[in-house]
Image (cartoon, helix red, strand yellow):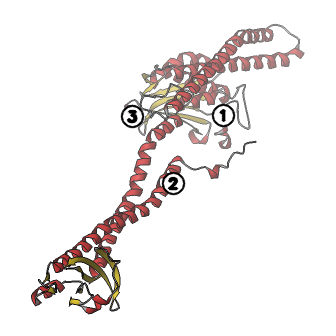
Amino acid sequence: MTSVPPASASRSLKYVLAVWLLVPLVALVPIAASLQYWLTLQPALRVLDQALGDEAIALANLLRVEPDGKVVYDISEQTERSLRTDRLDTILFAVIAPDRRMLAGDAVLARARIGDGADWNYADAIIDEVSMRVTAHRVECGAGWCEVRVAETLRKREQARRDVLLGTMTTLLVMATLLVPLTYIGIARGLRPLMHLRDELAHRSLDNLSPLERRHAPAELQPLVDSVNRLFERVRDAAARQQAFIADAAHQLRTPLTALRTEAELALLEPHPPALAPTLQRLNAASARAARLANQLLAVARAETELRKPDGMELVDLKTIAMAVAREWVPRALAAGVDLGFALDSARVICRPVLLEELLANLLHNAIEYAGRSAHVTVRTGVRDGAAFLEIEDNGPGIATADRLRVFERFNRGSAPRGAGSGLGLSIVRDIALRHAGSVELLDGTDGKGLLVRVRLPMASSLG
């Protein structure tokens, strides 16, 4: 059985990439720095050895062989002084005849064991307890071989090592300073399409299941985009079938429920035994509630369908919507013994008019249903604090403060339900408001009495 690692063990892709990029680079940089140090230092040391060898060649050119075979070495004091002059190092030299007799120079250097008899030898040696770099050059002189030795202390070489080390460390520091931010920037830029895809998916809902754009996605992400688009297609089909089922079921229920309600009302009006009156009244109330529930289910399905349409947004005045809904609800309010009033000011919004009419119809139904006879219900529209508003206020019993968040949940009627509602009305109101980038508040009415429902919507100008 495959075990699932805990959430705490998960790492971001940016973290994983940073580890796999920076850790090898951190390991490779010292190796590269060491290689650079060695490759830079060796040519510098070779140049110093070549200069030392040039001095040996210059000294060898002063050897002379007499006609009688005697080896003679002539070097002037000025030449010797010039040879030994150096700002940093001490210079020693020795010229040795074939019979190992020293012809000129420093005896301490002549006594040192240098080389293996080759024409050129370079070696580090301790001369008179001082570390020196020595070159030994063999030249033919008469019947034998003379040897010219030149040695110098190591100050120039040590300075070369310090300079190369400083240059290498500076390069290493610059690389380390630039490497981390450039790696981070590179990772961030490389992950930008993935972050864009994440943000786009985070804002998707059932209202927007259009295919993701794959043209600008990197080749590695295109299979993922295709898979997500296929998933969106399946979800769209499933949601459409679900909404079609709800709409069909609600539509099919309306006719028998309407007939049942009509029969119940007629049964109450016709002569009947007094003992049946409570039963008929309950039957009438239940049929009315069932019919209202079917209508609300149809409203939910219609709202979902309307929201999925690519167009349908219009520039509308809330005052116009309120006046259109008033034609249907004023007679209902009069029949219920409710005083329905209007205080309407212009408030232009971009919306789906059908849905805002449904929103207002649900609020009016709730106000008339729950406020009771002789109640006052007022509808207001206008602009306040830079936003359009739609308010329905009544002086009924209101909703307890503790229940004002719960009643927005579907089929939740609070802790003290009244009337014959189904608990869908305020849920529909909230969904429609949110889909229009708005909000819904339940507040106390005037003087703390009743309920004030305030819907705030962005004004058309603020939506560009």
Q: Report which residue position mark 1 lands on.
A: 409
Residue 208 sits above or below residue 330 on the image: below
* Identity of the residue drawn at 43% across and 62% down: 31
| Dot placed on the residue nearer the N-terminal end, 3 or 1 | 1
- State the image coordinates of residue 454 (x, y, percent, origin top left): 54, 35
Q: Give me the disc on residue 168.
A: none
* Identity of the residue drawn at 53% across and 32% down: 224
Number of other residues with Cα within 10 Å of mark 3, as a class: few under 14, some 14 to 19, many 20 or more: few
The image shows a total of numbered marks equal to 3
Could you tell me the amino acid type at mark 3? Answer: Ser
Q: Nearer the viewer, mark 2 or mark 3?
A: 2
Tell me how far mark 2 sits from mark 1, CA to CA: 46 Å
Regarding residue 375, the answer to whether it shows in the image is no
Tell me how far mark 3 sits from mark 1, CA to CA: 30 Å
Could you tell me the amino acid type at mark 1? Answer: Glu
- State the image coordinates of residue 262 (x, y, percent, origin top left): 74, 9
- State the image coordinates of residue 351 (x, y, percent, origin top left): 46, 25
Quarter holding the C terminus is top left
Q: Report which residue position mark 3 lands on.
A: 462
